[in-house]
Amino acid sequence: MTDPQLPAQYTKKGKLNARYYERELQLLQTELVRLQYWIRAQGERVVIIFEGRDAAGKGGTIKRIAECLNPRGATIVALNTPTERERTQWYFQRYVTHLPAAGEIVMFDRSWYNRAGVERVMGFCTDAEYDDFMRACPRFENLLVRSGIKVIKYWFSVSAEEQERRFQSRIHNTTKRWKISPMDLESRKRWVDYSRAKDAMFEHTDTKLAPWTVVPSDDKKRARLNCIRHLLAQFDYQDLVPGPIDLPPRVEATGYMRPPQDEQTFVPDCYPKPEASDADGN
């Protein structure tokens, strides 16, 4: 039961009620579908960058944004460690190949900002490479924006206490354990170093053409809804979703006979329907 002093959509701990959250999420996902139809019709090109601390909730938000969209026009890019060949390329080159064409949305689950974050903190790049990135990144993003690409950047912020709780949850849950990597554990040890790196990154790359927007994410549900609402507010879109479709009648199959089912292999039914007598309680 919720605290009578809190609105009905909140729990006693001040977090969003699950039922309220699901209802709001469904409404916002419907709006995202409308937005995608409009982006496709207008030929817009959209890049959304998701950065932040490990376990800050980036992946869950991306999943909720993408799950009701047409994957042919809304893709998620989460690149692995660069190959030996990619390390010899222009730093932005492997990201450029994933930029959107007309009518497309591309969501980067981490992006070129790896250089300003994990590479800087862990020593995976030289000081010269880091300094060059800090000078080049605003210019690179300005080129994207001036070419007509809309660049939206989110930084997911989580407290040390909440990050620790989520790490512990992942460690003790088999289905989440894959989310814990040696790099995550190292980032936990270097909390202050990552804070300094983030501050320096914002100082150099929080520009008028491509600003950063911070998403407080200690409450995952609130963070997801707030992020989606902010994303929708970046577009003056219209509802271009086609109306209901009338399905034509099926053409009667004349002269067709289905092959015997015993000649086919079916997946085993591990959850068979109960017999009629069992269903009736007899």
Image (cartoon, rainbow, N blue to C red):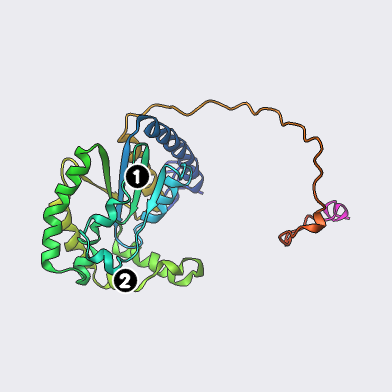
How far across and down, in percent of the image, does residue 57 sit? 37, 56
Residue at the front extreme?
255
Q: Secondary structure at mark 2?
A: helix
Quadrant of the rendered image containing residue 240: top left
Please state which of residues 135 and 25 is positioned toward the viewer in this rendering. 135
Under circle 1, the secondary element is helix
- What separation in Å lies between label 2 and label 1 (alpha carbons)? 26 Å
The reply to whether dot 2 and dot 1 touch (C-beta < 8 Å) is no
Measured as percent of width and height from the top left, residue 147 is found at 22, 38
Q: Which residue is mark 1?
A: 227
Give x and y (percent) for residue 76: 39, 51
Q: Is residue 176 visible?
A: yes
Residue at image coords 27%, 64%? 86
In the picture, measured across the screen, residue 111 lies left or right of residue 198, that is right
Is residue 230 toward the left or the right of residue 16 in the image?
left
Above or below: residue 56 compared with residue 28 = below
Instruction: Please tell me which of labels 2 and 1 falls first in the chain.
Output: 2
Magenta stretch contains residue 280? yes
The picture quadrant where one finds residue 195 is bottom left
| Residue 14 seen from this side | no
Residue at screen point 11% across, 67% down: 127
Closer to viewer: mark 2 or mark 1: 2
**Label 1: how many Cα within 10 Å (few below 14, some 14–19, many 20+):** many
- Residue 217's place in the image compared with 251, above or below, is below
**In the image, is residue 167 part of the stretch drawn in magenta?**
no
Q: Is residue 39 above or below residue 157?
A: above
- Range of residues picked out in magenta: 275-282
Residue identified by numbered label 2: 183
Q: Position of residue 13 (x, y in %)?
A: 41, 53
Q: Nearer the viewer, residue 72 or 243?
A: 72
Task: Give the residue type that dot 2 points to.
Answer: Met
